[in-house]
Image (cartoon, grey):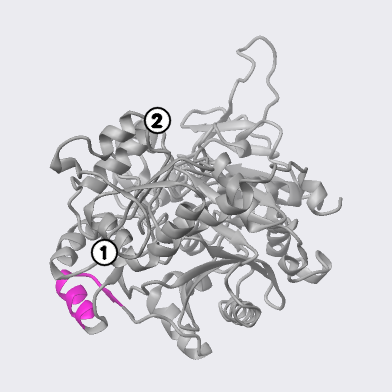
Amino acid sequence: MDDKIVEKIRERKRLGFLDKQLGDEDKIRELRKKFNLKPSYKMVDTCAAEFDAETPYYYSTYETEDEIEVSDRKKVIILGSGPIRIGQGIEFDCCTVHAVFALKEVGIETIIINNNPETVSTDFDISDKLYFEPLTLEDVLNVVDEESRNLLGVMVQFGGQTAINLAMPLKEHGVRILGTRPEDIDLAENRDHFGRILDKLGMPSAEWGTGYSFKEAKDIAARIGYPVLVRPSYVLGGRAMEIVQDETELEEYMREAVRVSPKHPILIDKFLQDAIEIDVDAVCDGETVLIGAIMEHIEEAGVHSGDSACVIPPQTIDERTVNRVIEYTKRLALELNIRGLVNIQYAIKDGTIYTLEANPRASRTVPFVSKAVGIPLAKIASKVMIGMKIKSLVDDLEPMKKIRHVAVKEVVFPFIKLPGVDPVLAPEMKSTGEVMGIDLDFAMAYYKAQIAAGNELPLGGTLFLSVKKKDKPEILEVARKFSDLGFEIVSTSGTSDYLSDNGIPNRKILKISEGSPNILDLMRERQIDLIINTPTVGRNPKRDGYRIRCSAVELNIPYITTVAGALAAVNAIQKVRDREIEVRSWNEYFGR
């Protein structure tokens, strides 16, 4: 080949271009290997040249001198999750760190690839080596080539969807993936394959279909019946996921979904209205399944699992159903040939347990589950992925059944920093963090979680209550309880008339469009202590509810946007208003 072409490639690589930006990725990679155009790795100088740095931080460059020293030890590469964003946050980084600790315990050298300096996994004293590299196929393969001596393989389960999406391409390039095989990952990620597995196991699922175009999606939705839950495949955080009510909304949705995930089909599911959603985090070694915990969502189906408060152990699900969920989880984990972590989501409606999806990787709830039940799931999973057996690592395969406390996970939202964003909960994830409340009963654990999330519930005062028509029958119990607790209830005409007709005292106030004084006036005058407002179906963002919810965020007034959340809140207020908050260490709950 012409030396000028080789030099051009070298020049562009020095400028930071990826192989796929220069042409066919595989062909450019072969050319680079043939002419020894490979990156060299430099150590990050953490000491500003004042004395020799020894921190094992490395970055790639296309220069001549390589500062990497490759050891002869057995080693594992762990892919991080890259930049923190909605749907992929520090929960995954926590799992990465625990994996490093576990592998160090058995004498294995740990190498992390991650390009986010603000995570714990990129601290100087965590892994044996850290490569500050983008999580692209090219950059990961370069590190694999560099560290190939006694490399056991690559772990992709702890880096969220970013890392999982690299599993099959890495395997196709001859890289050994530790844990669940890429083919088996695809069984869970590909909805057609997953549907056939559920049929084989006799596990119910909501009616569903997949389509690439509006016409295909329209035909599926017509067969299933509206409302439907639609989402792209192979995305994290419920990105572009929505509940669609009719054909017009479906056509509008498809334009966005195809843009988000152009190479993969759109998933269309029958929306299970008023179902109870649950999550299960488990570890499987191919023979034994460790059930970390079953989490019951406090919000009803239709709210993204990352945005829903949830509780361990379940509070409204009977023991028979819990045992069926455990049995389903074991059967599915074994059928999917899981080696490591798996997260499975179910919905319970009218006594039927519907399997929604399985994620063959760490989920964002793994740290919460680990703290709630006292079992380090990520550490166990990482040891399973290198061949160790669960029964050699733990004695109890269902630790949730032994705990005597209640743990509630609540989420933290960024709305205060995003003026004008509607804080209503929906299928697409919006939260950027989570907190945990723990106590001996649900009410106090839930109340603690609200305090930690910055949404402290008032124990008295004035409640503004306004709900959509469908929620009015369900809100009566909530309203009656607040009234019995001495709260003054303020409502706009529709909700106010409904409450009065059912014997619940309240004060009617004008809608925003009806003049003053209206609800916004009362909020600005600090006359409202708590807001319960469920959104009206539809996409008009300028309704009264939208303005009320946004103002609640700006004025730091506690707000709730679901009936289930309102019921949990009033029950918590009822039980904690005459109690002192008791603080215990985590160890005390486990008798340690």
Q: Residue furthest right?
A: 592
**Residue ID at (45%, 53%):** 483
Location of residue 560 in the rendering, given as x and y in whole percent from the top left corner: 41, 50
In the image, which residues are magenta?
209-222
From the image, give the main secondary structure of the stretch colored magenta: helix
- Which of the two marks, 1 or 2, is nearer to us in this view? 1
Q: Position of residue 374 (x, y in %)?
A: 75, 56
Q: Give the Cα distance between marks 1 and 2.
A: 62 Å
Please give the label number shown on residue 190.
none
Q: Secondary structure at mark 2?
A: helix
The residue carrying pointer 1 sits among few (fewer than 14), some (14 to 19) or many (20 or more) residues within 10 Å by Cα, namely some
Query: Residue drawn 35% across and 56% down?
Result: 426
Residue at the far top: name it: 50
Residue 406 appears anywhere in the view: yes
Location of residue 112 in the rendering, given as x and y in whole percent from the top left corner: 61, 43
Q: Which mark is residue 14?
A: 2
Which labelled disc corresponds to residue 469?
1
Q: Is residue 395 above or below residue 322?
A: above
Whether the magenta-drawn stretch holds residue 309 is answered as no
Q: Nearer the viewer, residue 546 or 1?
A: 546
Looking at the image, how many numbered discs can be counted on the residues?
Answer: 2
Q: Is residue 213 magenta?
A: yes
Relative to residue 103, is residue 478 drawn left or right?
Answer: left
